[in-house]
Image: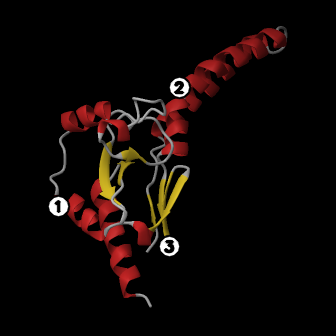
């Protein structure tokens, strides 16, 4: 059973719609006479649009979760399902769901900057999977272990769906020859 965590696209759609509507509104009066001015404004406001889309694009690159029968892929990182400890998935699924304030506090503390002294491993915390530097504000995260004992933190939007899919895949992989 493959699992793909869907990324919300509402913010991106709203930003792009506002940009296109604004450019169309400005183009109504300026295109016949001042096309250079209109193109300049399009480029200027495009920078503002890219700033607004930076977080959704970053989440898409670093925190996208896909799982198939053989591997779990989080962002730019892939690990085989056989390397995941099923007991840690079971333990994580039995933990209580965090409230919204608890998620914000946990995401503020889940930093894994690739600098000496700021790595999560230096503080005894779980390593963040995917290549990002921290869990995005307000997102939930799940900590699992590999069979070698390494702790991994996965930023997720739906903790229970991810853990349920992982538990099913891990139980299926044990039953396969």
Sooner in the amino-acid sequence: mark 1 or mark 2: 2
Element carrying mark 1 = helix
- Residue 133 as seen in the image, left or right of residue 93: right
Estimate the x, y position of residue 131 in percent, counting from the top left.
Answer: 51, 43
Left/right placement of residue 16 relative to residue 122 reads right
Instruction: Report the side of 9 relative to 30 (left or right).
Output: left
Mark 3 touching mark 2, by CB under 8 A? no
Residue 87, compared with residue 42, is above or below; it is below
Disc 2 is placed on an element classified as: helix
User: Residue 70, labelled with which disc?
Assistant: 3
Q: Between tags 3 and 2, which lies in front? A: 3
Q: Is residue 54 above or below residue 72?
A: above
Residue at 49% over, 47% down: 130
Q: Name the residue under label 1.
A: 94
Is 39 or 32 nearer to us in this picture? Answer: 39
* Crowding at mark 2 (Cα within 10 Å: few <14, some 14-19, many 20+): some
Quadrant position of the N terminus in the picture? bottom left
The alpha-carbon separation of the residues under discs 1 and 2 comes to 37 Å
In the picture shown, does residue 122 fall above or below 70?
Answer: above
Could you tell which of marks 3 and 2 lies nearer the N-terminus? Answer: 2
Q: Nearer the viewer, residue 55 or 115?
A: 115
Q: Which residue is drawn at 42% across and 72% down?
A: 82
Query: What residue does disc 2 label?
Result: 52
Indicate the position of residue 69 as horizontal and vertical percent values: 48, 74
Q: Residue at x 36, y 55 (%)?
A: 150
The quadrant of the picture occupied by the C terminus is bottom left
């Amino acid at each position: 059973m493959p699992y793909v965590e869907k990324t919300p696209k509402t913010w991106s759609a709203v930003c792009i719609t506002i940009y296109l509507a604004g450019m169309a509104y400005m183009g109504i009066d300026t295109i016949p006479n001042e096309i250079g001015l209109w193109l300049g404004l399009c480029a200027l406001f495009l920078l503002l649009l890219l700033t607004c889309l930076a977080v959704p694009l970053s989440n898409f690159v670093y925190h996208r979760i896909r799982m198939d029968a053989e591997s779990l892929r989080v962002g730019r990182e892939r690990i085989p399902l056989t390397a995941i400890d099923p007991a840690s998935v079971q333990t994580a699924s039995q933990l209580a769901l965090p409230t919204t304030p608890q998620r914000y506090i946990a995401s503020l503390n889940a930093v894994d900057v690739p600098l000496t002294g700021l790595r999560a491993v230096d503080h005894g915390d779980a390593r963040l999977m995917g290549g990002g530097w921290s869990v995005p504000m307000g997102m939930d995260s799940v900590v699992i272990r590999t069979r070698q004992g390494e702790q991994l933190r996965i930023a997720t939007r739906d903790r229970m769906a991810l853990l349920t899919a992982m538990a099913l895949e891990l139980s299926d992989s044990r039953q396969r020859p």
